[in-house]
Amino acid sequence: MTAEHVHSARPVIGMRHAAQHMLSRAVDLVLPPVCAACREPVVGSGGLCAHCWAKLSFITRPYCERLGTPFAHDPGPGVLSVQAIADPPAYRRARAAVRYDEIARALVHALKYGDRLDLAPLLGRWMSEAGRELLADADGLIPVPLHWRRLWTRRFNQAALLAQTISHRSGVPLLNGALRRVRATAQQVGLAKSERARNVQAAFRVAEQGIIMIRGKRIVLIDDVLTSGATADTCARILLRGGALSVDALVFASVTDATN
Ligand SMILES: [Zn+2]
């Protein structure tokens, strides 16, 4: 092949690349969005396919008014779960939109690591509905903060994204920066309850500018998942010690078995 051939071939290759690029862009635009849980194409912009949507387990009453954990049988109004009485958390009430099952885990994972930031408004909407009572008498929302090092690698805090949506919908202001994570904690999944509690001890503190923000305020903590409740419990303790009037916890998904 002569130099001339190479030269004359170049624009053709370039055009072919450009055409392929345009084609792939066109395919991107034409392809329907995929389900956040099973990655099947979905019609519309619901985030989930009909199959996964049907499997999603929304938490509805009857549930413990304190912990938000669903009851298998309705014990009557105002009855608390055994756990709420035996081992009450520092937070006043907890509410979750869905049970933490396979579908919920996939949604949280997609939001957290999969760059499906488009899920935040959807999950935030479900949370706003699940937490309507909490939001009705709240003064401020505080997302459970990430340690700056984790924020650095992940680029965003999923709890803050959810809190933003909930703030927009409910009109309850975000108290950004009121709570700080001063120590990175290891992953909570797979740890025993006592280990988790130790894990989050001393990981949070009220920021200097946060003291005025939280004093006398009814706070709703926002997080993606409530596992043992240790993180929410620790945050609530610290906020109450810092002068908050009350602290509730609102999460997308809760690890919960039906109790009575
Ligand atoms: Zn699906």
Image (spheres, rainbow, N blue to C red):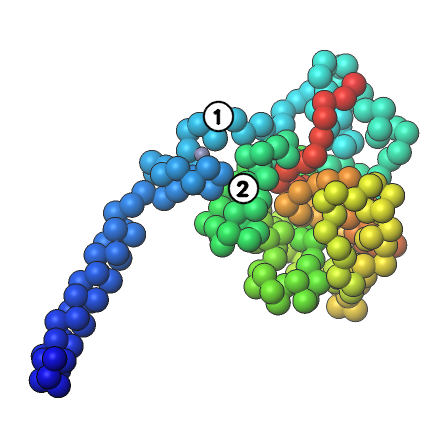
Q: The C terminus appears in which quarter of the rendering?
A: top right
- The local secondary structure at tag 2 comes to helix
The residue shown at (67%, 53%) is 143
Instruction: Work out whether 69 lies above or below 217.
Output: above
Q: Can residue 221 be seen in this view?
A: yes
- Between residue 210 and residue 253, name the one nearer to us: 253
The quarter of the displayed image where residue 91 is located: top right
- Between residue 196 and residue 129, name the one nearer to us: 196
| Residue 87 relative to residue 23: left or right | right
Q: Residue furthest toward the front? A: 1
Q: Is residue 242 visible?
A: no
Residue 19: x %, y % from top left:
18, 63
Residue 205: x %, y % from top left:
81, 61
Mark 1 residue crowding within 10 angstroms, few (<14) / some (14–19) / many (20+): few
- The local secondary structure at tag 1 comes to helix
Amino acid type, residue under disc 2 in the picture: Leu
Amino acid type, residue under disc 1 in the picture: Ala
Instruction: Work out whether 248 lies above or below 155.
Output: above
Residue that label 2 marks: 107
Q: The N terminus appears in which quarter of the rendering?
A: bottom left
Instruction: Work out whether 215 lies above or below 39.
Output: below
Image quadrant of ligand 1 equals top left
- Between residue 167 and residue 1, name the one nearer to us: 1
The residue shown at (12%, 75%) is 9
Residue that label 1 marks: 54
Q: Does the residue labelled 2 lie within 8 Å of ligand 1?
A: no
Residue 27: x %, y % from top left:
25, 51
Residue 217: x %, y % from top left:
76, 51
The residue shown at (17%, 71%) is 13
**Marks 1/2: CA distance?**
14 Å
The residue shown at (71%, 63%) is 147
